[in-house]
Amino acid sequence: MHKKLIFKRDVVNSILSYCKMHHPNEGILVLRGKNKKDGLIIESLMVPPMSEYGPYYSGFPIHMLPLDNSIVGTAHSHPSGNATPSLTDLHHFTGLVSVIVRYPYEDNDLFAYDVNGKELEYSVQD
């Protein structure tokens, strides 16, 4: 993905809060936004249906997601403090972008990746 990646400030704040709320377990969210010609804008979140959480995993049955063109990826936490995508993370990649948030879940603890596990630069917009 060579487009600009932009997160709305309230989305970043919500992701961080959700991760803190689920700690020491992982938390998982669905990213919703607009895939435009010049960039991908993450505008809102959705708690995935029938999601499961544990200290080393989080997930949900992908077939339970609604048919919704605004779904552009997922975000989940890594309570261990390591933001590198695992092999499992890469195999369960959904959408265009995957966000991993490492403990302690502050602004500089959010990382975005493409389907190949390459880190993506992003900006936050108010």
Image (cartoon, helix red, strand yellow):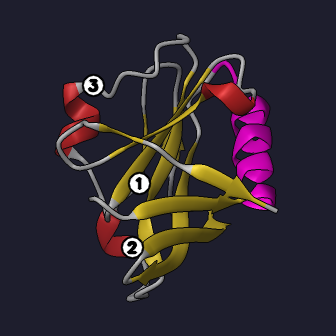
Q: CA distance from mark 3 to mark 2?
A: 23 Å
Viewer-proximal residue among 97 and 94? 97
Badge 1 element: loop
Q: Residue, x 61% and y 51% (percent of image)? A: 123
Task: Say whether disc 1 or disc 3 marks the residue closer to the N-terminus.
Answer: 1
Q: Amino acid at mark 1?
A: Phe
Magenta span: 9-24
Q: Amino acid at mark 3?
A: Ser
Q: Residue, x 77% and y 51% (percent of image)? A: 14
The prevailing secondary structure element of the residues shown in magenta is helix
Q: How many C-alpha atoms fall within 10 Å of the one at disc 2: few (<14), some, or many (≥20)?
A: few
Residue that carries the numbered disc 1 in the rendered image: 60
Residue that carries the numbered disc 3 in the rendered image: 86
Are the residues flagged by discs 1 and 2 in contact, CB closer than 8 Å?
yes
Q: Residue, x 48% and y 59% (percent of image)? A: 5
Viewer-proximal residue among 107 and 54? 107
Residue that carries the numbered disc 2 in the rendered image: 64
Q: Amino acid at mark 2?
A: Met
Locate residue 76 relative to residue 96 in the image: left or right: right
Q: How many C-alpha atoms fall within 10 Å of the one at disc 1: few (<14), some, or many (≥20)?
A: some
Locate residue 118 relative to residue 40 in the image: left or right: left
Q: CA distance from mark 1 to mark 3?
A: 17 Å
Q: Residue, x 53% and y 19% (percent of image)? A: 55
Q: Is residue 40 above or below residue 82?
A: below
Locate residue 36 relative to residue 92 in the image: left or right: right
Q: Position of residue 17 (x, y in %)?
A: 80, 40
